[in-house]
Image (cartoon, rainbow, N blue to C red):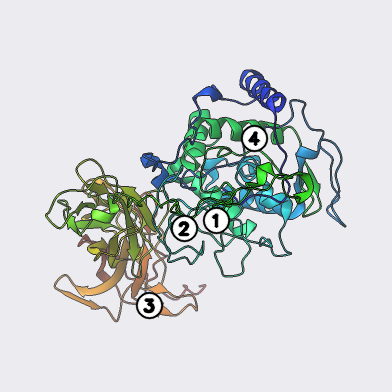
Amino acid sequence: MAAQFGRRVVKGAATTAVAAVAVAALSASQAPGVTDTAQGRQNTGSQPSSDPDADNSATGNSPYYTDLPPLNSPTPTPTTGTGTPTGTGEAEAGIPATVLDAYKKAEAALGESKPGCNLPWQLLAAIGKVESGQARGGRVDANGTTTTPILGPVLNGNGFARITDTDGGAYDGDTTHDRAVGPMQFIPSTWEWSGRDGNGDGKKDPNNIYDAALAAGGYLCRFGWDLSDKADLRRAILSYNNSTHYLNTVLSWLEYYRKGTHEVPDGTGTLPSGRSDDNNGSSSSPTPTPTPPGTTPPSSQTPGGGGSTSPSPKPPTTTPPPSTPPTTPAPPTPTDTVDHLEDAGTAKLTATAGDAFAEKIATRTETEAGKAVAKVRVRFTIVGDTDSVFTGGESVATVVTNSSGVATAPALKAGEKTGDFTVRVTVVGRAVSGLDYKATVTARQADALARTSDTAPTCVAGGEFADQVEVRATYKGAAADGVAATATLIKAADDATANDKGPYFKDADGKTVRTLAGLKTDANGLLKLPKLYADDTAGTFLLRINTTGGATLTVELKVTAAPSSSPSPSAS
């Protein structure tokens, strides 16, 4: 979660009671699908987290702000869109202008690229509130970048998940462990594949609210989730941070924002105060300065910084200073024990353009002795000149190995670019040699062609054929869409050379052409050729159509001689 804010309100028992009442009321009457907050995950103690879901969440299950919205609904105040944005009504309903603009732009962009997701900008606002207090009350510059970095606590296993460094400190400045970054609190390994350029500056910056909001929207819309469906909405939110209490808090803010919001100037938004990691002894809490031996602890000093009225006795010189207990090294994580990657029985990866690959890539992580290692994050990255993607439209996917040490990548979907590309597999947080898988995309193809009409194409010399030739392409009995085809008026059945006489097509300039390349069947496998014309030569001619995949069809074209003209009889 974000670093501590400058303003912090100490909550007492009364505030806690109000929060409990608020959650109960929202669960009963406002937020759809809200569950009992008593089931929420609490970070207690300082032992390394055993939560495997942290590896697959957007935030690494980092801490978050727990403030709940007021029970009364906000009153929306329309803005004119000019001048300095101002607002009235509930202070909590106010969203900084630039931050609000980023959420709405992300909703519009996802509405075009993934319309089936039905992402509401209010969901981004709810997550932004819980993750960073709307970028710390809208402390962003004119381009939407936070004026100071927003970093979550070090994910070193002390009260949180343990995630060793995955970015060399590029995003979070930490080369030992990862930290959540920016207003939407992405961990570096998630940002690596989910990052987006939301403001068109050519960069993907997790500290920029436009980039982060669009990335958060894309993250919530993966897997084909429809956020208008309660079940999918819950899955998406829990994938962002796997805590029931987090889910309930986000849903509460979502419902609150749906009832009305207003713009406030950047930097003036209401800052949250309660955090899910308060009083858990975690590394994000301030650490008291140790008191040197023989001095008076600060708690015994008089107010105002003065010393005690009684002098503190000095320890006897014969008493040795307290020894520092030996430090027990942290046990190695599963990732630390990985020595190499092995293929786990992946078959040949081949698919036709536009189709899904039938085979999935499976990789096993092993120790030096060849023992499988479970609960290791494995990253699959598509490289090469290709438009093929994983399910959900991403080029990178991170998967945690199962109890057998195997990570299975999401299904690959072939794009329209044919040829070979590579899927590179690496271990997140561990410098071991990667494993490459070759994948091949073949062109769309047809194995059969048939005319859609039984009428023989005929024409009078010097005229034009009445009907256009139309064919249907199929592959294994199904319509073959998007298949490349060529049509040529050939000299003979055993001579595929283009004819120099007889029927012909016309190009865009009206010139005679007898070969048409670059043709393609439509979504139903149909291909209708342009109009055919005949020169002065009568006879039977051949039109041959070929497709990728080897389908061939030869059509006979008959041209009859033009009727001869005779002089009109003269009058007697």
Residue at the spot 82% in from the left edge and 33% down from the top edge: 75
Going by the numbered disc 3, the residue's amino acid type is Val
Residue displayed at 23% across by 56% down: 338
Across and down, in percent, residue 131 comes to 60, 45
Disc number at residue 188?
A: 2
Q: Are marks 1 and 2 in contact (CB under 8 Å)?
A: yes
Q: CA distance from mark 4 to mark 1?
A: 22 Å
Amino acid type for the residue under numbered disc 2: Pro
* Amino acid type, mark 1: Val
Q: Quadrant of residue 466?
A: bottom left
Give the answer, above or below, for where 254 lies relative to 535. Answer: above
Is residue 482 left or right of 475 when viewed as pictured? Answer: right
Q: Which residue is mark 1?
A: 181
Q: Is residue 375 above or below residue 368?
A: above
List the residue tagged with mark 3: 513
Between discs 3 and 2, the one toward the N terminus: 2
